[in-house]
Amino acid sequence: MKRLFLCLLILSIVCSKLFAQDNDLLLAKQYAANGDPQKALDIYQKLYKQNNEAFFTVYVNSLLGVKKFDDAISITKKMMRKHPEDHQYNIMLGAAYTQQGAIDKANIIYDDLIKNLPPDQGQIAMLASLFYQNANVDYAIRIFLQGRKLLQSDQLFSYELINLYRYKRDKVALVEEYLNFLPTNPPFITQAENTLSGLFEGQADYDILKAALLKRIQKDPQQTLYPELLTWQFLQQKQFDQALNQALALSRRQNDDGSNIFELCRTLTANEAYDAAIRGYEYLVAKGKEQQLYIPSKIELINTKNLRVTSGKYVKEDLLSLEKDYNDLLTEFGKNANTAFAMQKLANLQAYKLHMLGDAQKLLEETINIPGIKPALLADCKLDLGDVMLLNNQPWDATLLYSQVEKDFPNSTIGQDAKYRNAKLAWYTGDFTWAKGQLDVLKAATSQLIANDALNLSLLISDNITADSSGAALKIYARADLLIFAEQPDKALITLDSIDVKYPGNSLTDDILMAKARLFIQQKNYTDAVPLLKKIAEEHSFDLWADDAVFMLGDIYENQLGDKEKARVYYQKIITDYAGSLYINEARRRFRLLRGDKNETAS
């Protein structure tokens, strides 16, 4: 019993002592944080006297903090004599000399450690870690490099060196180390790309990588990883043709199945580098029908050509070439449920780009009668056929198709789209009362895009019917809107210009400006669109299209005209002047990105 009591007493004393030390440590840290380093030092000194080794580091650092260098050096030397094999004290002594200004003395100590470095991987890593913990990255790197020489392996310590070079932002050394590391560790290529893209700041940095890669390719032409990285480097600099050229050269050399080219083409398409993507898909198609990627490549080739056309980056020959591609695809694979998507896209090309409404209608009618077509695609084709019938002066047939889809897909986005197209048909044909009734229902649509469009059109009708109960000027505007939808810009502009001539002083001024701006944007004519949008923003700042115009200006300056500063001004205007706008969240997000501080709230 006495022995138990004695053990408990000793344990209680030890625990009390440890608790007191913890309190002292917290108090010392608080003094240091409050700008009273001398009081902190006094506590650390007391703790150091109680346990030299446990409190050595905090005590020496505290001495250095108040510039008592001689004291710090003295006690560190004592610890070195006591523990000659523990190099943390050598490094601490070097740190003390460095802070004292005796850098030469510090370097002598550090160089001596490198000179006497043992050929032991674990000890080398430990010593380098001690240097890193003392914020001496340069000597940590030197330790690892010397360790490689001693152990005669350039593959050792690569991961550690990569992290150190990244910390130092030594881009040249980081590139070389990655190129040394990746050939034997190819799964890390994505990590390398992410690291480099996060560190590189412009063309000069990517040129470092390019030069290093070209040198490696020349030295080791059989290593495929270097050309892959070079392709990635070209992509980062948006040198899309060169990226494709590099990938094609590698594919031809390896005579592979082209899967890397296929994935690259997807990336090119996502970056709107349509011409380069088309060239890549054509290479894959030319490899022959027996290839696994032949059919996917042929389909993506046509899809990419279609994207080029719909983006406005085309000439007349591109339209005819795309039409031929669709027809060739349908000839090769037949008109069936698997090719219905191509029939739909060909019909849209014929209707809106080639203005062959009869051919488009016939093809869509053929498409919706194909057995086995997926319900969603069938509904899309019916909606497209309704649109073509509307343009073909068959409004009753069009509304019948819209109503079918609305009935078949109740309470869904596609059903709401059908209802919206029915409302637009009434708008185009001048039945404003019925159109507004349908639009008011759609203001609560689950699709924000449909709800927003319905709200805008409903307000446009109500605002202008109030000013002109006959709606005469509004009917001309609606006809112009139909011409815009039909992609007949010249006729649409003439119709819009006629409104002021026939009905001077009408209430459609800002609506006409917005319609013209959208026409110019549709034609990629941003230079002419900008003054119209500015006029809306400045002279009609409380009208329907004000926030639309401001946001569109921001988008054009950011993504089309390359003026980030002006873009930021317009996004800021949405935030400050149009807090209730549907664009508010997107404007705030873009503003933060352009300002470069994503974590801050725009104000």
Image (spheres, rainbow, N blue to C red):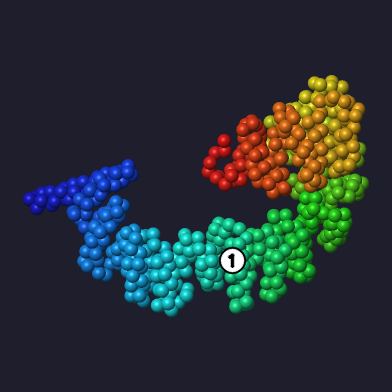
Residue 30 position by quadrant: top left
Q: Is residue 493 above or below residue 334?
A: above
Residue 283 seen = yes
Can see residue 408?
no
What residue do we see at 72% from left, 33% from top? Answer: 537
x, y (%) of residue 240? 70, 61
Q: Nearer the viewer, residue 331 or 51?
A: 51
Q: Quadrant of the C terminus?
A: top right
Instruction: Report which quarter residue 458 is drawn in.
Output: top right
Residue at the left extreme of this rendering: 2
Give coordinates of residue 536: x percent, y percent: 75, 33
Kind of residue at disc 1: Ile
Is 200 placed above or below 524 here?
A: below
Q: Which residue is mark 1?
A: 208
Residue at position x 32%, y 42% in the image: 34
In front here: 540 or 581?
540
Tell me: residue 429, above or below residue 76: above
Q: Secondary structure at mark 1?
A: helix
Percent across and percent down for residue 524 are: 79, 47
Relative depth, front residue between 141 and 266: 141
Left or right position of 493 against 46: right
- The residue closer to the viewer here, 169 or 279, is 169
Position in image of residue 20 (x %, y %) = 21, 46
At a point 57% along the width and 38% down the height, the residue shown is 602
- Position of 6 with respect to 194 (left or right) is left
Q: Is residue 29 left or right of residue 520?
A: left
Total numbered badges shown on the rendered structure: 1
Residue placed at 34% from the left, 58% from the top? 99
